[in-house]
Structure formats: C-alpha cells, structure tokens
Image (cartoon, rainbow, N blue to C red):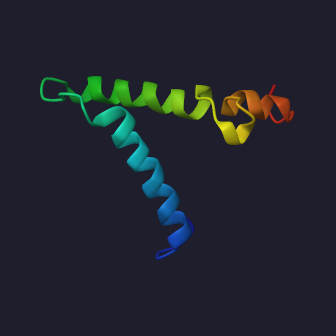
Amino acid sequence: MSKKGCSPDNSACEGVFGRIKTEMFYGVDWRNVTIDEFISVLNKYLNWYNEKRIKSTLNYMSPSEYRKSLGLIA
C-alpha cells in the first residue's frame, strides 16, 4: 500500500481478501484445523491464485503463462 487513506489501494486489497474468503475460507469447517494446516492450505490457494488460475483479462492464460508470453520471465 502506498500511503494511509489511499482508496485505490484499499479497494484492491479488499477485493483480494474478499475473493480469498469466498473461494477458500467460507463453507469449510476450520474448527479441527491447526494453524500450521491452515497456513499450508492458504499458501496452496495463494500459489494457485497467483500462478495457475486462468483469467479472461489475460487472454485466458494463467498469470505465469501471460508473463512468459511477454518475455518477462523465463
């Protein structure tokens, strides 16, 4: 985030956190899950979200495929 009270940053963060809650958190009984297990599940979800999910705005490619197509990563 760039600075306190910067609403564009806040809306982007809120959107990501809302998506995480909707897609990963809600609808699961977390009562018997340890902190370490939860961290593992969250890390797997974030890896999928950042590297593997298909996005229409990226020409139906994953973020990593899109970066490769632009020559930004090997």
* Residue found 69% across the figure and 42% down from its top: 57
- State how many labels appear: 0
Front in this rendered view, residue 37 or 31: 31
For this orientation, the residue located farthest to the bottom is 5
* Residue found 44% across the figure and 24% down from its top: 44
64 with respect to 39 (left or right): right
Classify the position of the C terminus by image quarter. Answer: top right
Front in this rendered view, residue 65 or 72: 65
1 with respect to 45 (left or right): right
Percent of width and height locating residue 45: 44, 29
Q: Where is residue 36, by image quadrant?
A: top left
For this orientation, the residue located farthest to the right is 71
74 with respect to 46 (left or right): right
58 with respect to 38 (left or right): right
Percent of width and height locating residue 2: 57, 68
Q: Where is residue 41, by image quadrant?
A: top left
Percent of width and height locating residue 11: 49, 63
* Residue found 62% across the figure and 29% down from its top: 54
Percent of width and height locating residue 10: 47, 65
* Residue found 51% across the figure and 72% down from its top: 7
